[in-house]
Image: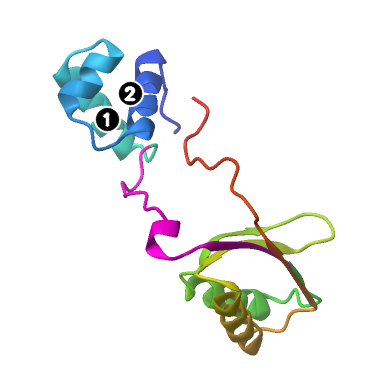
Amino acid sequence: MPVRIDTLDRKILRELQRDASQSLDDIAKAVGSSKTPVWNRIRKLREAGVIGAQTVLLDAEALGFEATFFVLIRTSEHEAEWQRAFLRALQARPEVQEAHRLAGDIDYILKVRVANARAYDAFYQALISEVRVHNVTALLSMEEIKHTVALPL
């Protein structure tokens, strides 16, 4: 059964999305409540699965991952075994930050973060050695204009 989210829950979630490392006191102050009710709501939202794993956002470029490729994949293979092999190949590669199965002319789109074009080619060669694909188009992002993981609460 879905959990009911009220205005205070949304305020708390917005604060957590903005900075999950802030103290419970700071969150309570920002949302106009006290610490205990805020903690109880956060616990309820975690138990309901609204709040998942907490992590840290890293600066990819500062760590040497300067190239983002969007990889469009078309395949003529649609059998369950091919899909399982494709999924295993994607999950085994940390360069793949996102993967989506699409409706339309393109079957899959991947967001791949690597150091440079040579690293992308190594990724590409490894991928096609494991699974057959009909067509691959790689698009290099020239500039990231907007990036967020925050939902529009």
- Write down the residue under mark 1: 42
Dot 1 alpha-carbon crowd within 10 angstroms: few under 14, some 14 to 19, many 20 or more? some
Q: Quadrant of residue 68?
A: bottom right
Q: Residue at left 38%, top 62%?
A: 63
Does 53 lie within the magenta span? yes
Q: Secondary structure at mark 1?
A: helix
Q: How many marks?
A: 2
> Quick one: label 2, few (<14), some, or many (20+) residues within 10 Å?
many
Q: Which label is found at residue 12?
A: 2
Q: Secondary structure at mark 2?
A: helix
| Residue 105 belongs to the span the image colors magenta | no
Residue lying at 33% horizontally and 48% vertically, measured from the top left: 53
Q: Residue furthest top?
A: 32
Q: Residue at x 37, y 31 (%)?
A: 18
Q: Is residue 91 left or right of residue 145?
A: left
Residue 95 position within the rendered picture, expressed as x and y whole percent measured from the top left: 50, 69
Q: Amino acid at mark 1?
A: Ile
Asked if the residue under mark 2 is in contact with the one under mark 1, i.e. CB atoms within 8 Å, the reply is yes
Image spot of residue 119 (x, y percent) = 54, 77
Residue 54 visible to the viewer: yes
Q: Is residue 2 above or below residue 8?
A: below
Q: Is residue 111 visible?
A: no
Report the side of 8 relative to 103 (left or right). left
Residue visible at 37% across and 49% down in the picture: 57
Dot in front, 1 or 2: 2
Q: Give 146 or 25, whichever is nearer the viewer.
A: 146
In the image, the segment drawn in magenta is: 51-72
